[in-house]
Image (cartoon, rainbow, N blue to C red):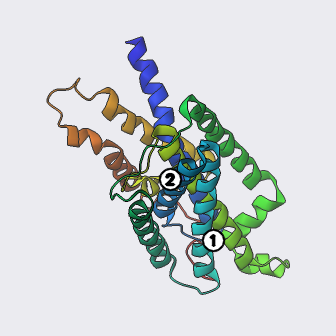
């Protein structure tokens, strides 16, 4: 029983880690006033870029950096679209998801001459625990930065009242682009963890809706980094349960086990509907 419990805790932390990185990205973006529906695509392109660079360099650490950079690029594109061109943020984020997923699928054929999945590449091995620990450090650091620093005050002001920020001589649009770029970098890191931490390859659909679960965690955590992190741990627990309990509960279908984290996300969102308040200018063009 003790071994089972330890396995469940370890697997929960591993499964929660990519969600935490993406959710922290979502918190930064939404606190600045931009809804980042593109987290799913940024995770996907981060996972793909990490595998490609690890494949060519044989250095998974460089792959992680590439995943961060690819996610940041996706965030920058979304930020420019949502601010300078005032494209509807939901539409722009959906476009990012489609472009990133489609680009990665095409890249598999272009680079590996096979659809569906890449070749196996050098992965992080047990070193992925560094990224697991770093996720919690990042959550605590972001909480402190948003609450206690001038930078955090500007991000929060940008999401609540960008006109007030502009009156103080700070460009809200530049702050939003910066925040969404950082959001994409964190989501890309979450994707890179998936492909080089949990696995050693990229496959189509491997993000499996984690970007949207991360968005649910942002809302459930009330746009607070620590709240979003605890929500991700809860969702990670439900994902871990499907592996720990599979085969132990004969009457429960495998498909139902796999659906646990998604059902948990829907139930969580349904339970808090109307009880939480997003930043006042979240999703509102300036």
**Quarter residue 161 falls in:** bottom right
Name the residue tied to disc 1: 76
Name the residue tied to disc 2: 47
Q: Is residue 186 above or below residue 226?
A: below
**Quarter residue 103 falls in:** bottom left
Say which of 184 and 228 sits in front.
Answer: 184
Question: Alpha-carbon neighbours of circle 2 within 10 Å: few (<14), some, or many (≥20)?
Answer: many
Q: Residue at x 77, y 66 (%)?
A: 154
How far across and how far down the image is residue 187, in percent?
A: 56, 56
Q: Residue at x 46, y 19 (%)?
A: 6
Say which of 258 and 170 sits in front.
Answer: 258
Q: Residue at x 55, y 46 (%)?
A: 20
The answer to whether residue 231 shows anywhere in this view is no
Which of marks 2 and 1 precedes in the sequence? 2
Q: Quadrant of the C terminus?
A: bottom right
Q: Is residue 183 left or right of residue 11?
A: right
Is there CB contact under 8 Å for labels 1 and 2?
no
The answer to whether residue 148 shows anywhere in this view is yes
Q: Quadrant of the N terminus?
A: top left
Q: CA distance from mark 1 to mark 2?
A: 17 Å
Q: Is residue 100 above or below residue 194?
A: below
Circle number at residue 49: none
How far across and how far down the image is residue 203, in percent?
A: 38, 52
- Secondary element type, mark 1: helix
How far across and how far down the image is residue 125, in percent?
A: 54, 32
């Amino acid at each position: 029983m003790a071994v089972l419990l330890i396995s469940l805790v370890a697997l929960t932390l591993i499964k929660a880690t990519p969600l935490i990185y993406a959710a922290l990205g979502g918190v930064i973006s939404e606190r600045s006033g931009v809804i980042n529906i593109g987290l799913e695509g940024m995770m996907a392109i981060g996972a793909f870029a990490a595998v490609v660079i690890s494949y060519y360099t044989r250095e998974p650490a460089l792959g992680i950096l590439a995943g961060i950079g690819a996610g940041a690029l996706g965030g920058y594109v979304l930020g420019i679209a949502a601010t300078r061109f005032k494209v509807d943020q939901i539409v722009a984020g959906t476009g990012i998801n489609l472009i990133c997923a489609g680009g990665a699928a095409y890249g598999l054929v272009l680079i590996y001459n096979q659809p569906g999945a890449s070749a196996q590449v050098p992965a992080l091995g047990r070193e992925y625990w560094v990224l697991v620990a770093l996720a919690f450090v990042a959550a605590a650091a972001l909480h402190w930065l948003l609450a206690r620093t001038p930078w955090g005050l500007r991000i929060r002001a940008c999401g609540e009242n960008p006109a007030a920020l502009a009156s103080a001589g700070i460009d809200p649009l530049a702050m939003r682009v910066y925040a969404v770029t950082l959001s994409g970098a964190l989501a890309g890191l979450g994707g890179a963890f998936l492909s080089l931490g949990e696995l050693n390859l990229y496959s189509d659909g491997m993000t499996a809706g984690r970007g949207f679960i991360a968005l649910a965690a942002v809302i459930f955590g009330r746009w607070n980094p620590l709240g979003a992190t605890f929500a991700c741990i809860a969702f990670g627990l439900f994902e871990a349960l499907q592996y720990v309990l599979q085969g132990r509960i004969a009457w429960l279908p495998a498909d139902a086990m796999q659906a646990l984290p998604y059902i948990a996300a829907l139930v969580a969102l349904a339970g808090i509907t109307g009880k939480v308040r997003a930043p006042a200018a979240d999703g509102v063009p300036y």
